[in-house]
Image: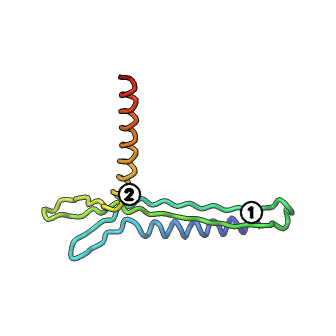
Amino acid sequence: MLAGMSSAYEQVADRLRQFLMSHTGEVREISGKQFLPVSIVAGGLGGGEDTSADVEKPQAKGIGGGGVAVPLGVYRVDEDGDLEFQANPITFMAVAIPFVAVLGCTIRRILKVAKKKS
């Protein structure tokens, strides 16, 4: 039973790897201009089975996986022919908002400690 599980796991891993690799980093042409998308891609797979009751007849088994792709922006050729990176503003805000919140809390704590010492 475990050998069948392993081959199923390998098939899913191969298909996921092919999917993720074939959908990132392809040059696109829009209105005569070329764009190269840039993203962070991550994925994971897992599997297992429960053989606690009877080794010959497992009670439960399964595999699962997931993935995420975060679009960072695109490289494009500007009017002068130079390569330029254009960031994705939504991704930038998603990263900047928590960063600014943590920075604000840190500054507040530093000021509170400084006030107690004076």
Instruction: Say which residue appears at 67% left-offset and 68% top-offset.
Output: 7
Decide which of 18, 89 is in the foreground and name it: 89
Characterize the local packing of mark 2: few (<14), some (14-19) or many (20 or more) Cα atoms within 10 angstroms.
few
Q: How many marks?
A: 2
The image quarter containing residue 23 is bottom left
- Quarter holding the C terminus is top left
Decide which of 112, 46 is in the foreground and name it: 112
Question: Residue 49 got which mark?
Answer: 1
The alpha-carbon separation of the residues under discs 1 and 2 comes to 38 Å
Decide which of 92, 3 is in the foreground and name it: 92
Residue farthest along the bottom direction in this orientation:
31
Instruction: Say which residue appears at 50% left-offset and 68% top-offset.
Output: 18
Report whether 81 appears left or right of 118: left
Report whether 82 appears left or right of 63: left
Characterize the local packing of mark 1: few (<14), some (14-19) or many (20 or more) Cα atoms within 10 angstroms.
some
Up-down: is 118 above or below 88? above
Label 1 secondary element: strand
Of pointers 1 and 2, the one earlier in the residue sequence: 1
Instruction: Say which residue appears at 25% left-offset and 69% top-offset.
Output: 34
The amino acid type, in three-letter code, at marker 2 is Ala
The amino acid type, in three-letter code, at marker 1 is Glu
Label 2 secondary element: helix
User: At which x and y percent is residue 37?
Assistant: 33, 65
Residue farthest along the left direction in this orientation:
80
Disc 2: which residue: 94
User: At which x and y percent is residue 14?
Assistant: 56, 67
Up-down: is 26 above or below 99? below
